[in-house]
Amino acid sequence: MECFAGDDTIFAPASGVGRAAVTLLRLSGPAAGSIVDALCRRRPAPRRAVVRALRDAAGDVLDRAIVLWLPGPGSYTGEDCAELHLHGGPAVLSDVAEALVALGARPAEPGEFTRRAFVNGRMDLTEAEAVADLVDAETSAQRRQALRQLEGQLGALYRGWADRLVRLLAQQEALIDFPDEELPTGVEAAMAAEIAALAGEIRAHLDDGHRGERLREGLVFAVTGAPNVGKSTLVNALAGRDVAIVSTQAGTTRDVLEVRVVFGGVPVTLLDTAGLRDVVDAVEAEGVRRARARATAADLVVQVTDTGAPAGPAGERVIRVGNKADLAPVGGDVDVVVSALTGVGLDGLREKLADAARRLTQAGGPPPLTRARHRSALQAALRRLEAARGGVLAELRGEDLRLALRCLGRITGTVGVEDVLDSVFRQFCIGK
């Protein structure tokens, strides 16, 4: 986002592109007020929606729109802002955009509105990332997680740790700068205990089973089993549409097929894999190899057998499904019996899959980590705290504490953020 500049006035549609009843166009920047004056000849009172005729420089009416004037700093970006609720025809949006450019505004870059909100202190970096997550949320569970982060709970947790580190660093600096002074007894022991406690809290936060990241990105469930046990029929039934080719010929599925579904409010990529068996054909053998690899990496394995076939071993991340109950009683030690062809038992299987999805993503206590960027910074902070605990020289302990503080600051955006800003905001929509 090389053209970002806070002294520009930017605009962008904040609603969907294309023909619609209403299109919302947002402006932000120092010239927003004068541009609104030029467009509608009379600026509305702050935060009061009014209908105005929008005119170009020649005085021609472009549209009759609802206009909102939102002066800073109490706006989304912290700057002077305005909203134009236009009729949703493409010609209206195009002509109004042309008038805005003529008045000195420019189209916004992806994420530039939220970036300005961050730069102007309206939100920290974790909250800015939550805006993107909220826009991308496919399910209610993702929405709730994004809102929790947007409300500042994750940032507050990290800022609390940073505040404690600041106090520790101040105490350590006092020990370095005034070695001969009579400081309170037990200062070093208290510092060591606090460093240990802080390290323990960060370690526990990291040890969350990647629940937040899994919910944000979605889970992967691999459907595995021998050829002709009904894996593809089962995937089609769970997806509610024909995704995979179904045939009685063994080896029909040779590559891994993917379909996006929702179980328990969690997005899940369901994998239909090649039948697991010893084969000579090179193409089918590659399919079997890929099936085994994807099953190993999956969050959950749905292991399918048919009538009379022995089930595999149980496991926390394995659901054993006995299929083809319409043909004969399903024997063996399975978790659920179904007929993918007739639908018998599918509701019970869906509930088991939903329970597994919720178990893999739900976490109590503090808001979970949602990004690899957060995890990497916290792991680095933990390493510096562990180094500080084992440090002999006071100066080195102080440097380790300072580096740990910097690692935490990179998450919320308080220090050392220039190297991550573009990667964070590049994923945003235009107008957000």
Image (cartoon, rainbow, N blue to C red):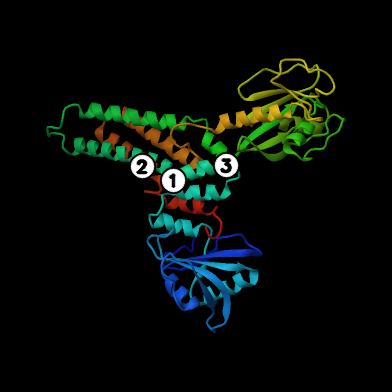
The residue labelled by disc 1 is: 151
* Relative depth, front residue between 221 and 140: 140
Q: Residue 175 location in percent, x, y?
A: 20, 35
Query: Mark 3 or mark 1: which comes first in sequence?
Result: 3
Quarter location, residue 224: top right
Task: Report the mark closest to the observer, 2 or 1.
Answer: 1
Q: Residue 315 location in percent, x, y?
A: 63, 20
Query: Mark 2 or mark 3: which comes first in sequence?
Result: 3
* Relative depth, front residue between 116 and 182: 116
Residue drawn at the location 16% of the way across and 34% of the way down: 179
Residue drawn at the location 54% of the way across and 54% of the way down: 428
Query: Mark 2 or mark 1: which comes first in sequence?
Result: 1
Marks 2/3 in contact by CB < 8 Å: the verdict is no
Callout 1: 10 Å neighbours few (<14), some, many (20+)?
some
* Relative depth, front residue between 372 and 161: 161
Is 222 placed left or right of 96 in the picture? Answer: right
How far separated are the C-alphas under marks 2 and 3?
Answer: 27 Å
Q: In this view, which residue lies farthest toward the bottom?
A: 58
The residue labelled by disc 2 is: 159
Residue drawn at the location 31% of the way across and 31% of the way down: 195
> Looking at the picture, which amino acid does disc 2 mark?
Arg
> Looking at the picture, which amino acid does disc 1 mark?
Glu
* Relative depth, front residue between 159 and 397: 159
The residue labelled by disc 3 is: 140
Marks 2/1 in contact by CB < 8 Å: the verdict is no
How far separated are the C-alphas under marks 2 and 1?
Answer: 14 Å
Quarter location, residue 352: top right
Element marked by disc 3: helix
Q: Residue 7 location in percent, x, y?
A: 41, 67
> Looking at the picture, which amino acid does disc 3 mark?
Ser
Residue drawn at the location 61% of the way across and 72% of the way down: 92
